[in-house]
Amino acid sequence: MSIPKTMRLVDGEKGNLIQITSLNLDGVMRRRLLDLGFVAGAMVEVIRKSPLGDPIAYRVSQTTIALRKEESSRIEGVLMTDGE
Amino acid sequence: MGNSYRVALAGNPNTGKSTLFNALTGLRQHTGNWAGKTVSLAQGDIQYKDKTFNLIDLPGTYSLFSNSSDEEVARNYIVFEKPDVTVVVLDATSLERNFNLALQVLEMTKNVIICINLIDVAEKQGITINERILTNRLGVPVIKISARNKKGFPMLLDTIDRIVTGAIDCQPVQTTYPDDIEEQIKKIEPKVSELIGNELSARWVSLRLLDGDENLLNEINERFGQKERA
Ligand SMILES: Nc1nc2c(ncn2[C@@H]2O[C@H](COP(=O)(O)OP(=O)(O)O)[C@@H](O)[C@H]2O)c(=O)[nH]1
Ligand SMILES: [Mg+2]
């Protein structure tokens, strides 16, 4: 067993399963992400990175949602499995 | 038009709202503007018993906090245009996500039906949903349908009918917030109530004000200010 690794969603690799711990933003941007299902405790799978790395598609609560770097760099979580 | 009632369809994107709308209204559709806005919403009529239900297909959104113009349109319709019944269409395979919007609607308005669609897909996935327990917990009718297979429509239409005739009295469950927030609500709710009367839910408006929703405040000023001048 290794120590849980804290990471930002933006740094996730395809196939990673990350459990969200915190959202480091507020106001409308925070509200929007919460509404999309990016809440503490939620499991997020990294689905696909676009060629330039932005946006990145994530699967959360049975829906695929693409986030820009400004958003995904402010969401932190713990890596649960690297999908390999 | 004493026997005509407006029924709004709300829901997340891709929950089958348009499929339901088309199946129920067939060719009796048109788009209409409302309240002088340039937004046009698909509308269609259903004849049921001695009544006409005018269905309005609201934009599909994940929330109604007006983060986008679609959310604003849907929210304003539910809150200010006051449909007789608001039907929230949910995806049976993704209830956790879909209840975000559903619980928001339950805070905004009284006459709500929770309409769980895609029940055929859920059943194939082994998901069973107990609508009676949900109805008890939510305080409003919960109905399972499959819009594509036209299943569950009689129950849905009958429930709309029984809400507009007053045979069903909806008591939507209100989300309870942490103590500090509830205390703030208690402080401002009576004042909000005084200002807006019974037009809107004072608790909901109070919550939005605590959240700093200036957009809503402007909308209220515009609409209620106009009425006073008229
Ligand atoms: N299997 C199944 N598919 C459905 C059902 N209702 C809608 N769909 C499908 O779900 C997709 C989205 O439907 P649509 O009405 O466009 O959703 P909207 O975005 O909420 O208006 C379409 O491919 C529909 O054919 C249903 O009850 N069962
Ligand atoms: Mg649609």
Image (cartoon, coloured by chain):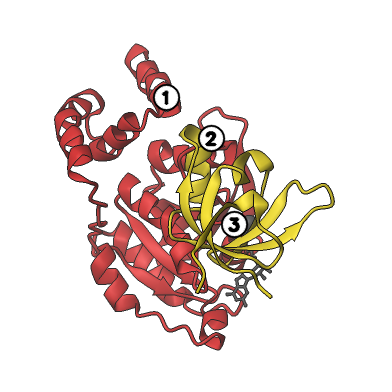
Chain colours: A yellow, B red
Mark 2 or mark 3, whichever is nearer to me: 3
Mark 2 or mark 1, whichever is nearer to me: 1
Using the image, tell me which numbered label, if any, was put on residue B119.
none
Disc 3 residue: CB within 8 Å of ligand 1 = yes
For the point 31% across and 48% down, which residue is it? Answer: B107
Total residue callouts: 3
Residue B85 location in percent, x, y?
Answer: 38, 54
Within 10 Å of the Cα at label 1, are there few (<14), some (14-19), or many (20+) other Cα atoms?
Answer: few
Within 10 Å of the Cα at label 3, are there few (<14), some (14-19), or many (20+) other Cα atoms?
Answer: some
Q: Nearer the viewer, residue B111 or B181?
A: B181
For the point 49% across and 54% down, which residue is it? Answer: B10
Kind of residue sitting beneath label 2:
Trp
Horizontal side of residue B118 vs B185, given as left or right: right
Residue B133 location in percent, x, y?
Answer: 28, 76
Using the image, tell me which numbered label, if any, was put on residue B13.
3
Q: Which of B17 and A13 is in front in this view?
A: A13
Separation of disc 2 and disc 1 at Cα? Answer: 22 Å
Using the image, tell me which numbered label, if any, was put on residue B34.
2
Within 10 Å of the Cα at label 2, are there few (<14), some (14-19), or many (20+) other Cα atoms?
Answer: few
The image shows residue B71, relative to residue A14, as above or below, that is above
Pointer 1 residue: B214
Horizontal side of residue A42 vs B130, given as left or right: right
SS at circle 1: helix
